[in-house]
Amino acid sequence: MNLYMLLLLIVESISIAAFTYLSILFIRVYRRIKSESILFYTIFILLLLLGQLCGILSTVVSNARIAATLYVASSSLAAAGFMIMLFSSFSSNELYIVIPIFIASPDILAGILSTVFVIESVRGRTRYFISILSASYYIRGIGTLLTAFQGSLLALLISETIRASAVVLLALHHTAQVLAYGEEKR
Amino acid sequence: MAKKRDRLEIIFEILDALSKEPLNPTKLATLVNMPYDRLKKLLEELIEKGMVQCEEQGKAKIFRLTSQGFKIHEELKKVRKILQDYGILK
């Protein structure tokens, strides 16, 4: 570990300690006051804290794949945190135009990444389930935009149904694989 | 148009006013600038949470902060600057 990395770790650790202190303080205040704005800020701080943890871990782990995953997680968590704060900053008119674009973009990105993943690596029946899951992210992204601009919840409801079904099917499929292996062994 | 005050902001003002001295409902409503019927609901909530207590002095009611109320007022003062920086509090 070089000097730069060591200094970075020290700085990151200080920020994590400070964010943890703030999170505890805000959780305590929220428990007593039950104010929505305190709750939003607490979630914001907690997401930044988790993002910082992922950030610090991404610099520590030696495995490049884990490091890249944690790196993406750190910015994604921060994006989610800024999203909750943005809700209170926009007027309701702006909210319906700007926010859906922000909300839809991670869905589209998840759709693209899962499609690439299916094409590159996934085999067997799992491929079908991940493909359905992948499609649900695209529909979800489009559904978010349609809901905002046309006021129709249909696409969003369809996408949520597909996503939930795909996840259940995937989980059941993998559980069945594990159980089938147990049966074979017996 | 002036932005409507957040519930948190009103609670802070109530706690702030009561931290200086115990007050009757009329004076408290004037200090926090809100109608008594709305203030009453908030005060009931704060009494239920043990932050404020109500004493009857003859016909008059006097509201004062409990030790719990002083504690939460101090904690709110600590986080106030942060909340102001994010536009959550004025």
Image (cartoon, coloured by chain):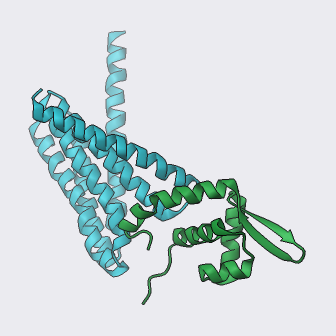
Q: Nearer the viewer, residue A50 or B5?
A: B5
Residue B4: image location, x then y, percent: 48, 81
Residue at the right extreme of this rendering: B58
When the figure is inspected, residue B34 is found, relative to residue A38, above or below; the finding is: below
Q: Is residue A95 left or right of residue B58?
A: left
Can residue A2 be seen here?
yes
Q: Nearer the viewer, residue A179 or A53?
A: A53
* Image quarter (top left, top right, bottom left or bottom right) of the N terminus of chain A: top left
Residue B11: image location, x then y, percent: 58, 68
Q: Residue at x 72, y 65 (%)?
A: B64
Q: Residue at x 19, y 31 (%)?
A: A60
Residue A85: image location, x then y, percent: 35, 64
Q: Nearer the viewer, residue A138 or B75?
A: B75
> Where on the picture, by quarter, is residue A140?
bottom left
Chain B: what color? Answer: green
Q: Residue at x 11, y 31 (%)?
A: A3
Residue at the top extreme of this rendering: A186
> Where on the picture, by quarter, is residue B85?
bottom left
When the figure is inspected, residue A18 is found, relative to residue A107, above or below; the finding is: above
Q: The chain coloured cyan carries which letter?
A: A
Q: Residue at x 45, y 58 (%)?
A: B79
Q: Is residue A106 left or right of residue A22?
A: left
Residue A173: image location, x then y, percent: 32, 33
